[in-house]
């Protein structure tokens, strides 16, 4: 058990002992630590809730095999306690020996900055892209910058600046990590507590002992809540580094994905089963958020408009729920009980998601309807999977988000489609089922009428997209 963390900041080893530093706490965001404590004010605070990317920093850490992975993350979301055993690079650490980094030079030369407020965040997203030696195509650069808003330069000159780096073609830089120390971090001051267990057994014991403590994984929901509620005395169990919750394995005929594998990794893993997942999950928040946010965090939030549950429903996924001394497998269909509620019992956690490996006949359609392509919560989501057996639709599974108080399947649609011919006429007729099955609400993301209309039209899009796949003209 320890009360301190060790990490590297811009190449310099650091140790923070929370017991002896009254002004520091593992609950504070990395952004607060950088700006308010260290006075490293190059990292900017725009929104403070993950929306703008001004606070982007680069974080290097070990994966399960001990290899170094380097990601861009939002420092306004991740917590200081999460830096243990990692290397944090901020905009102050990018230029070396008074020489601007190629990324900075190209932004300067291509006039990729005006007021400059977004620029440190843009530099850090581009720097992470560069040192990971990702390709310098427009598509790949836009994906790396999906979480960086700029209100004055215009994205074209920023994107062009980075495309021009093609000539230097990125350099894989090695980033050193501190020696791994897996002791658990336990810290209490006044009403606030922060516990960072190292393995699943220890986590489950803490969950049993302190069921009221909030678990934090990617912190993309929890940090926003804490900021909105001005919560300074949180009781937290940080599960972000528990390797048991990050394992991925094929077991029997299933793909088992640890509950807290990052969404960005899930995107790559699930592409092995269904190619359409890539586009769907690319529209989930931003790269910075996907690099840390987890499927469990999304599902446990029980939002009616979360993107993950509808996808899992259409894949026929199950979840392993565990508590000290017991575990159970439940179908994702049973997980949400009512608005913002789920069936997790006191002391229970989501341990993994169990996704059936699809047969060669199975097809999947996933669509998120939102007003912006990147960084937007959906107005509604439609996911559907079925087998296409000699032109007949079989074993239909659906998942809708934003159409009811909870993400849920349309059993009426599943029943209607089952056994019918895969023709446009079938999907046109299915439109009537939607209006019968859902009583949607109107809110800021769309009126009830809009949602129903989109849901009906998506049936036709689904037919056209999957028809392309069936006749080989799809992607
Ligand atoms: C700017 C922004 C954009 C976003 N865009 C999207 C979007 O496009 N689509 C979308 O669906 N969501 C979006 N979200 C919401 C959020 O990022 C996701 O729901 C994310 O998946 C949460 O995961 P996390 O690991 O960060 O959760 P955390 O914030 O760490 O935790 C959230 C909740 O989940 C619980 N939890 C975490 N792990 C477990 C577990 N293993 N077992 C039980 N409970 C657990 C925690 O206790 C907590 O109550 C966005 C959020 C932000 C801030
Ligand atoms: S300050 Fe806007 S994303 Fe962090
Ligand atoms: S240069 Fe002003 S916000 Fe981007």
Image: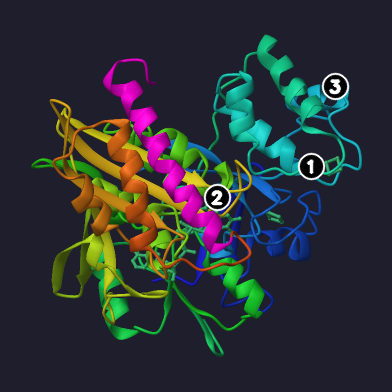
Label 2 to label 1: alpha-carbon separation: 17 Å
- CB at mark 1 closer than 8 A to ligand 3? yes
Q: Quarter holding the N terminus? A: bottom left
In the rendered image, the vertical position of residue 370 relative to residue 239, given as above or below: above
Give the magenta-colored segment's residue range.
447-475
Residue in the image at 62% along x and 52% along y: 74
Q: Position of residue 268 (x, y in %)?
A: 38, 34
Q: Specify whether 232 is left or right of 277.
A: right
| Residue 329: numbered disc | none
Instruction: Pick whichever, 196 or 255, lies toward us.
Output: 255
Specify whether tag 2 is near ligand 1 (CB below 8 Å). Answer: yes
> Any atom of ligand 3 within 8 Å of the CB at mark 3?
no
Residue name at image x 54 percent, y 80 percent? 234
The residue indicated by pointer 1 is 150
Q: Secondary structure at mark 1?
A: loop
Answer whether residue 436 is visible to the viewer in this image.
yes
Instruction: Say few, some or many: other residues with alpha carbon within 10 Å of mark 3 (under 14 / 14 to 19 / 20 or more).
Output: some
Q: Report the residue at 63% width, 45% height from top.
A: 372
Q: Is residue 326 left or right of residue 83?
A: left
Screen quadrant of the C terminus: top left
Residue at which label 3 appears: 110
Q: Mark 2 — residue? A: 289
Which quarter holds ligand 2? bottom right
Whether residue 6 is visible to the viewer of this picture, yes or no, is no
């Amino acid at each position: 058990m320890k009360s301190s963390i060790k990490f590297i900041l811009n190449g310099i080893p650091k140790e923070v002992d929370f017991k002896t530093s009254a002004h520091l706490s593992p609950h504070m965001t990395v952004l607060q630590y950088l700006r308010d404590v260290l006075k490293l004010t190059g990292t900017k605070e725009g929104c403070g809730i993950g929306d703008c990317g001004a606070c982007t920093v680069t974080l290097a850490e070990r994966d399960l095999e001990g290899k170094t992975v380097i990601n861009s993350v939002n420092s306004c979301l991740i917590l200081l306690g999460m830096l243990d055993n990692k290397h944090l690079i901020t905009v102050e650490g990018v230029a070396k020996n008074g020489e601007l980094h190629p990324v900075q030079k190209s932004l300067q030369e291509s006039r990729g900055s005006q007021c400059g407020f977004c620029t440190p965040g843009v530099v850090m997203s581009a720097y992470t892209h560069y040192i990971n030696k990702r390709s310098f195509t427009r598509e790949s650069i836009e994906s790396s910058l999906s979480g960086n808003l700029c209100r004055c330069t215009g994205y074209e000159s920023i994107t062009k600046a980075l495309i021009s780096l093609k000539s230097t073609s990125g350099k894989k830089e090695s980033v050193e990590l501190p020696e791994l120390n897996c002791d658990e971090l336990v810290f209490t001051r006044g009403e606030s507590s922060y516990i960072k267990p190292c393995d699943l057994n220890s986590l489950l014991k803490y969950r049993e002992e302190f069921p009221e403590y909030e678990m934090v994984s990617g912190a993309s929901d929890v940090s926003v809540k804490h900021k909105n509620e001005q919560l300074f005395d949180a009781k937290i169990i940080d599960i972000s580094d528990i390797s048991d919750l990050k394992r991925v394995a094929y077991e029997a005929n299933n793909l088992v994905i640890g509950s807290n594998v990052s969404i960005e990794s899930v995107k790559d893993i699930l592409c092995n089963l269904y190619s359409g997942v890539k586009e769907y999950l690319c529209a989930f928040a931003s790269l910075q958020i996907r690099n840390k946010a987890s499927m469990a965090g999304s599902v446990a939030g029980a939002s009616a408009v979360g993107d993950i549950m509808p996808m899992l429903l259409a894949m026929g996924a199950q979840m392993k729920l565990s508590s000290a001394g017991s575990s159970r497998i439940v179908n994702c269909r049973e997980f949400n009980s009512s608005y913002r509620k789920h069936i997790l019992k006191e002391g229970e956690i989501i341990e993994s998601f169990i996704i059936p490996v699809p047969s060669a006949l199975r097809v999947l359609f996933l669509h998120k309807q939102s007003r912006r392509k990147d960084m937007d919560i959906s107005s509604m989501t439609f996911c559907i999977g079925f087998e296409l057996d000699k032109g007949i639709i079989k074993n239909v599974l659906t998942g809708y988000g934003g159409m009811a108080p909870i993400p849920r399947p349309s059993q009426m649609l599943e029943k209607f489609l089952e056994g019918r011919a895969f023709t446009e006429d079938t999907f046109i007729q299915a439109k009537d089922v939607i209006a019968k099955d859902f009583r949607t609400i109107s809110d800021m993301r769309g009126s009830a009428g809009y949602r129903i209309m989109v849901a009906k039209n998506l049936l036709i899009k689904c037919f056209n997209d999957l028809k392309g796949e069936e006749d080989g003209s799809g992607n």
